[in-house]
Amino acid sequence: MNNKTIELTKEYMKERGQVYPDGESALKFAVTELGEVFDAILRKDERWVRNNDRSRDLEFEFADLYMMLSIACFEMTGVHVEDALAEKMKSKVGEQKWLEIVNRVYGAHEKVNTPEDASKDSIEETVMHDDPIAEEVVNQEEPPAVKRSIAGTSMRTKKGTLVTVIKELGAGQVLVSAIMQGKEVRCQVALESLIEEDS
């Protein structure tokens, strides 16, 4: 997973001269941040008078709470909290249903049952995001490569999208790359769904 939350947090704290906490301390800080979330909510209620006039941005307090929970999770388990959330949801619905959910949320317009089905909809419908949940579509275990290599070959999808073969995955599947709206898109597709580009 390409998750930068912890790295960003460390650099942010370094810039502010703060000490990056250990997991247990971060979890304790999270409890105090939860209190600040409630404080921000109470300050919006005109019925209550607080003992100081400090204003709190509710979204920032939620962000601080999330930051401390992220640190606690990573330091105590070695797993990013976003990745843990994705894995937890996938474990509840099964890998196939999880991929269908990811495709619905991140751009596939039709239900995806198999890699062959995904390739029929063209690579334009599988968009790569920095979000870790989206990467579930791409970061699957790759089967061994087949003997005849076509890595680096330019091909086109049935809809005319130009792609480059990155790696042969076996069982008639290849990992391809294309540039969509200025971003690199990678997708596993059926080789038979591609047409070799004339050199």
Image (cartoon, helix red, strand yellow):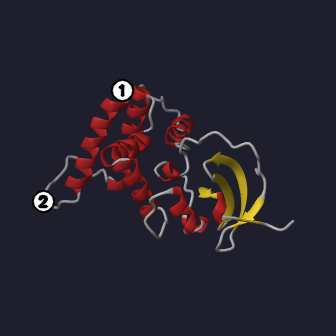
Distance between the alpha carbons at the discs numbered 1 and 2: 34 Å
Q: Residue 38 at what x, y percent from top left?
A: 23, 48
Percent coordinates x, y for residue 82 in the rendering: 42, 44
Q: Where is residue 125 shown, x and y percent of the image?
A: 55, 67
Q: Is residue 195 left or right of residue 77?
A: right
Give the image quarter of residue 35: top left
**In the depicted view, which residue is nearer to us: 34 or 75?**
75
Please, what is the three-letter code of the amino acid marked with disc 2?
A: Arg
Residue bearing the label numbered 2: 47
Q: Position of residue 26 (x, y in %)?
A: 37, 31
Crowding at dot 1, Cα within 10 Å, few <14 / some 14-19 / many 20+, comes out as few
Bin the neighbour count of mark 2 within 10 Å (Cα to Cα): few under 14, some 14-19, many 20 and up.
Answer: few
Q: Which residue is mark 1?
A: 25
In this orientation, does residue 183 appear?
no
Q: Which is more toward the observer, 15 or 62? A: 62
Q: Is the C terminus in the top left, top right, bottom left or bottom right quadrant?
A: bottom right
Give left or right: position of 198 versus 34.
right
> Where 8 sits versus 131, above or below?
above
What's the residue at 63%, 53% (across, down)?
172
Q: Is residue 187 left or right of residue 30?
A: right
Instruction: Please tell me whether mark 1 sits on a helix, a strand or a loop.
Output: helix
Judging from the image, what secondary structure is the residue with disc 2 in?
loop
In the orientation shown, which residue stands out farthest toward the left?
Answer: 47
Q: Residue furthest right?
A: 199
Residue at figure coordinates x 49%, y 53% from the top left: 134
